[in-house]
Amino acid sequence: MSLVDALPPWAAVLVGVLVLLGAGFACVGSLGLLRLRDFYQRVHAPTLGSTLGTFFMVAACVAGFSLAQGRPALQVLLIGVFLTLTTPITLMLLVRAALYRDRVEDGQQMPPPAPPGESSQNPMP
Amino acid sequence: MSHAFLGAALVIAQLLLVLGMACALLRMLRGPRAQDRVLALDAFYVNAMLLLLAVGLRSDSVLYVESAMIIALLGFAGTLAFAKFLLRGEVIE
Amino acid sequence: MRRWLPHPLMAGFLLLVWLLLQRSLAPGSWLLGGALALGLAWAFGKLQPPRARLRGAWRLLPLALRVVHDIVRSNLAVAGVVLGPRRRARAGFVAIPLELADPYGLALLACIVTSTPGTIWVDHDPARGILLIHVLDLVDEASWVETIKRRYERPLLEVFQ
């Protein structure tokens, strides 16, 4: 007997809606990678998948596994915690790398007011 | 009825996530610059991780959750290394 | 107390992660998890992280609710931008003068700004206290400066300084 059949009807509907929402947000985010015009716009798109996309998917897993197996399956929450902690760090470093390369290489893309010298530093401890 | 809905929802969700992975893959191939490719790789592994969760729900196995967790952590380390490389890797200091 | 448990929050978090991963509350899990948490928290202390000075941490709760609300709203906004008709780019950089200088406060602000789709933290100049962010749907520069300063910086200032 699979998880799908083990759930009570109301829970099946709930999990189904959560799964669809999560996958939908993640898909729209990835679509943004293709549709937006330049790097600085595209960098905003995948955040959809790692915030609400992951949230709905994790919620679906917690609800589905807990209700089907009769004991809380909270370890899925850890994925949400890890992703919320790590995504900002990745994106920030990536944007800084892009800005650095743009400033050094050709200065197309209107590099914004450059701080004097190398005084900027990463605020993450 | 509601169980058929959940089954269909899981299939549709998997298709959506595969579509998302395809978009990321296309951006990874098209570039045009290295930072675009790294960003696409990041989106690719997040989608792959969500896909694993959906597969796990469909086959009622918590094991998929564990592998999704590993992907989340390794993907983070990988993207971070790439970004760090872009930051200082190829420009002479 | 301080000597054996230099970072109680860190140790507690590690123990929680261990128990969640084990999916059990058996005595063995508590024992092994507790030992790991103590050891790792001690090792973390050896890295000599700067001490955080929190005053009135309860003020972070309304801030968290506000951030969740903003994340949901801007998720929908960015989804609209992606799915909507292709239009002239309105994205741009905004420079914001900050009063916040505490490293933990800045780290938290960075996470808030970056986890909200549509805005991303680019650069912070600690010498002049100027923060540079990139906004996807930039209509009015002044209103963004006002939003960041009033909605996020003020509560962080009260807690961290």
Image (cartoon, rainbow, N blue to C red):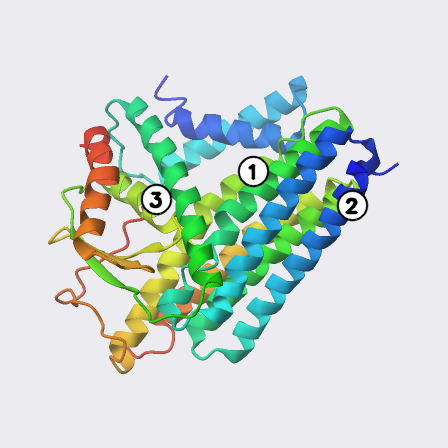
Q: Nearer the viewer, mark 2 or mark 1?
A: 2
Amino acid type, residue under disc 2 in the picture: Gly
Q: Which residue is mark 2?
A: B7
Residue receiving disc 3: C112
Q: How many marks?
A: 3
Horizontal side, residue A42 vs residue A78: left or right: left
Please tell me whether residue C87 is drawn above or below residue C39 in the rendered image: below
Residue C13 screen position, x and y as percent: 48, 29
Mark 1 chain: A
In percent of width and height, residue A100 lies at 29, 70
Of all residues shown, which one is farthest toward the front? C85
Q: Are marks 3 and 1 on the same chain?
A: no
Chain of residue at mark 3: C
Q: Amino acid at mark 1?
A: Leu
Residue C15 shows up from this direction: yes
State the residue in front, A55 or C100: A55
**What residue type is disc 3 on?**
Ile
Nearer to the camera, C5 or B65: B65
Instruction: Tell me if mark 1 has few (under 14), some (14-19) or many (20+) residues whose alpha carbon lies within 10 angstroms of its own.
Output: some
Asked if A102 appears above or below C137 in the picture, the reply is below
Whether residue C61 sits left or right of residue C103 in the image: it is: right
Dot 2 and dot 1 within a common chain: no
Say which residue label 1 marks. Answer: A78
Residue furthest to the bottom in view is A106
Q: Are marks 2 and 1 in contact (CB under 8 Å)?
A: no
In 3D space, how far apart are the residues under numbered discs 3 and 1 (Cα atoms)?
Answer: 19 Å
Residue at x-position 80% and y-position 45%: B59
- Between the residue at mark 2 and the residue at mark 3, the CA separation in whole angstroms equals 36 Å
Compared with C70, C11 (above or below) is: above
Q: Quadrant of residue C63?
A: top left
Instruction: Decide: is B28 above or below A31.
Output: below
